[in-house]
Amino acid sequence: MKIYPINTGNFKLDGGAMFGVVPKTIWQKTNPADENNMCNWSIRCLLIENDNKLILIDNGIGNKQDEKFFSHYYLHGQDTLEGNLKKLGFGLDEITDVFLTHLHFDHCGGGISWNKEHTKFEATFKNANYWTNSRHWKWATEPNPREKASFLKENILPMLELGQVKYTDKEQFNNFDFLLVDGHTDAMMIPHIQYQGKTVVFMADLLPSVGHIPLPYVMGYDTRPLITIEEKDKFLKLAAEKEYILFFEHDSINECCTLQQTEKGVRLKEAFKFSDIFS
């Protein structure tokens, strides 16, 4: 097995929304904001090459939305999903499976694209199954008012119409396990991958960044923040004990980290690049 981090680009989100009730004077120490109170965030994926499978975990925002939509998120940088796959020697049509932690636009938008004529949508990964779970699919396709702006029909419904949606409901997928959590959104999946003797955890939105490690640091986007705190508490203690490698989808500075138990609770032990640990 080989694992490759893939950066699909960077975007900006309001710092207050990303840190909820935590005051700006505190969170800006780890995530400095610009003059508009916007903080910089990455959109990383993981590519797993295993035997005859190429499994992509999440796929970024994509590029099919209109100018008004993108003006809210300030996409920047030179990284693209297709470009970085190409640098690794892979093409879009080689992806066999797309594992979607959840169906918010910044995690699944890259899976559906316009055709060349810009007349209809098509699958970015034509030969891949797109994996979610049935509980989250129902949640995303019958959205509540709070999350409706994050569950975009053009990202989600074409996957079904093209016959590429599959469900995994046993907290185990192909060659890795995953944890189901409900605080951020219903039935988000957090992959746990055994790799070179270590457990790599793809954090999705359970832990967006190093700055979110303390328990009260919960996003305003989370639908059930008190449940997020419970889920984080349980996970962080286990991650520190088992020395998990946490891989961040959104931390623009820190790609990975380990944790340690302190008198103040679980805190950062060390931050590093994926390539610093794995050859």
Image: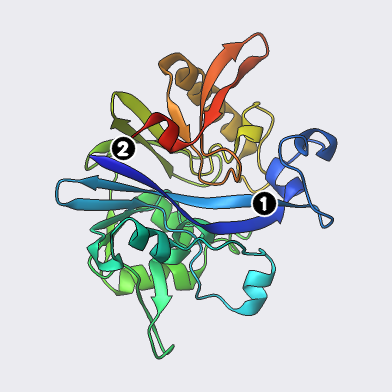
Dot 2 and dot 1 residues touching (CB under 8 Å)? no
Q: Pointer 1: what residue?
A: 40
**Which residue shows up at 44% across the image and 88% down it?**
118
Q: Which residue is more in the foreground, 35 or 131?
A: 35
Q: Position of residue 94 (x, y in %)?
A: 23, 62
Q: Position of residue 134 (x, y in %)?
A: 34, 52
**Which residue shows up at 22% across the image and 43% down it?**
174
Q: Work out whether residue 184 can be spotted.
A: yes
Above or below for 44 versus 79: above
Above or below for 277 versus 33: above
Which numbered dot is residue 56? none
Q: Quadrant of residue 243?
A: top left
The residue type indicated by label 2 comes to Glu
Q: Position of residue 130 (x, y in %)?
A: 31, 59
The N terminus: image quadrant: top left
Q: Pointer 2: what residue?
A: 171
**Which residue shows up at 47% across the image and 63% down it?**
80
**Which residue shows up at 68% across the image and 55% down it?**
13
Above or below for 94 versus 207: below
Q: The residue tagged with tag 2: helix, strand or loop? A: loop
The C terminus: image quadrant: top left
Q: Position of residue 198 (x, y in %)?
A: 34, 25
Q: Quadrant of residue 116?
A: bottom left
Q: Which residue is more in the foreground, 6 or 147?
A: 6
Q: Which residue is more in the foreground, 81 or 128?
A: 81
Tell me how far mark 2 sits from mark 1, CA to CA: 32 Å
Above or below for 181 versus 39: above
The furthest residue to the top: 263
The residue type indicated by label 1 comes to Asn
